[in-house]
Amino acid sequence: IPAKLAGSIERLKVNSVSGAIHALGLSGERFDLSSVSGTVYAQGLHGENIELHAVSGNVKAQGISAEKLQVHAVSGTVVTEGISAEVAKLGTVSGVLNAHANAERFKVNTTSGRASLTVDQCPEAAKFSSVSGELAFYIPDNTGFTAEYNSTSGEFHSDFPVAIQQDGKRKRS
């Protein structure tokens, strides 16, 4: 994409079967980058709606800002750094997700994979879900929060002092 057009993209959709996708320094309204087995690499994207997906390939996102951001891999690895969004949906089915991001609202999910989210500012809301995978959420010290969780066989652990209240299957700390 020529430099003079890189800042005014209305919609960019790129699909790949096995090739890598590299999107660098683009601004616009909507970006949809998807690969079956290739790597999706996005750096310096700014947009209203950004979606990055891979099936067995990896997704790496750096320095992205968006109103709505979706980053997902089925069995590949997802790594994010320097992400800023109003709403961020991050996920994997059986892969690994390591995210360092800030958003007003997060939705993080995995089926049997491992998902880890580190934030510099505590979000207004964060919802995590997993069937049998491991979830980790790292927030700054001195952050007040309420965590509500349900579990069939898993457990909740916090390095912050918490008081656990149990009401049926719902627990609140």
Image (cartoon, rainbow, N blue to C red):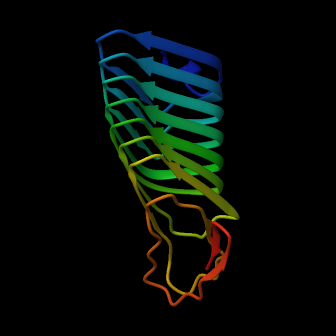
Front residue of 79/10: it is 79
Question: Looking at the rendering, which quadrant does residue 125 occupy?
Answer: bottom right
Q: Residue at x 64, y 64 (%)?
A: 123
Q: Where does the image place residue 7, in percent across and percent down from the top left?
A: 60, 28
96 up-or-down from 75: above or below: below
Q: Residue at x 58, y 70 (%)?
A: 121
Q: Where does the image place residue 96, in percent across and percent down from the top left?
A: 33, 44
Q: Where does the image place residue 148, in percent across and percent down from the top left?
A: 64, 68
Q: Is residue 65 visible?
A: yes
Q: Is residue 97 visible?
A: no
- Name the quarter where the C terminus is drawn: bottom right
The extreme front residue here reads: 168
134 up-or-down from 160: above or below: above
Q: How many marks?
A: 0
Question: Looking at the rendering, which quadrant does residue 117 occupy?
Answer: bottom left
Q: Residue at x 30, y 18 (%)?
A: 37
6 relative position to 20: left or right: right
Q: Where does the image place residue 165, in percent across and percent down from the top left?
A: 65, 82
Q: Residue at x 59, y 61 (%)?
A: 150
Front residue of 117/6: it is 117
Front residue of 11/96: it is 96
Front residue of 27/74: it is 74
